[in-house]
Amino acid sequence: MIPEVAKLLNTLPRRIDCPIVFYDFPKSFRLCKLFKEWTSEAGVKGLTWMRLRNTGISRMCEAGVAFNVIQSQAGHSSREMTERYNSPSDDYKKRELEKYNNSLPTDTPTDTGVMGN
């Protein structure tokens, strides 16, 4: 995370007793608007509060955290909602596909003939 953004996030009020990563803030707090102002002041472009949420959920999925734990931490009532936030990184997809490729047998000839011939 960009140090300036981390510094700004550390200034946010915290609810220590809250186990949820991104709990609901009162509407009057307008966290998204404040976050936009802070990132603008820090010279960070294109970073939004929701992008941080998506990234956090995606990284937890990539790390192998149980999906029901991620769902609970995000405060989602359904698996489908959590799945909408999960966007695997290109590096993660590449690593996962390499696992698959490495699992394929290499000592078996490939049959490219048509079935029945």
Image (cartoon, helix red, strand yellow):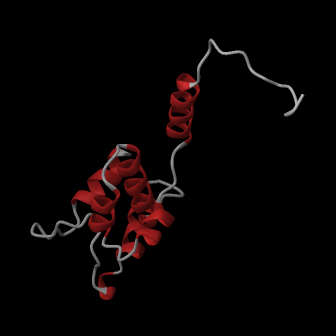
| Residue 108 falls left or right of residue 15 | right
Which one is nearer the viewer's eye here, 84 or 33?
84
**Image position of 83 with respect to 27: above or below:** above
In this view, which residue lies farthest toward the top?
107
Which residue is at 34% across, 45% downward? 64
**What x and y, as percent, mark residue 58?**
43, 53
**What x and y, as percent, mark residue 99?**
51, 29
Residue 41 visible in the snapshot? no
Picture quarter containing residue 53?
A: bottom left
Picture quarter containing residue 79?
A: bottom left
| Residue 16 falls left or right of residue 82 | left
**What x and y, as percent, mark residue 61?**
39, 50
Quarter of the picture containing the C terminus is top right
**Image position of 90 with respect to 68: above or below:** above
In this view, which residue lies farthest toward the front?
116
In this view, which residue lies farthest toward the bottom?
28
**What x and y, as percent, mark residue 38?**
38, 63
**Image position of 4 with respect to 108: above or below:** below
| Residue 40 falls left or right of residue 21 | right
Which one is nearer the viewer's eye here, 96 or 75?
96
In this view, which residue lies farthest toward the left?
17
Residue 52 visible in the snapshot? yes
Which residue is at 52% across, 44% downward? 89
Picture quarter containing residue 82?
A: bottom left
Which residue is at 35% across, 73% downward? 76
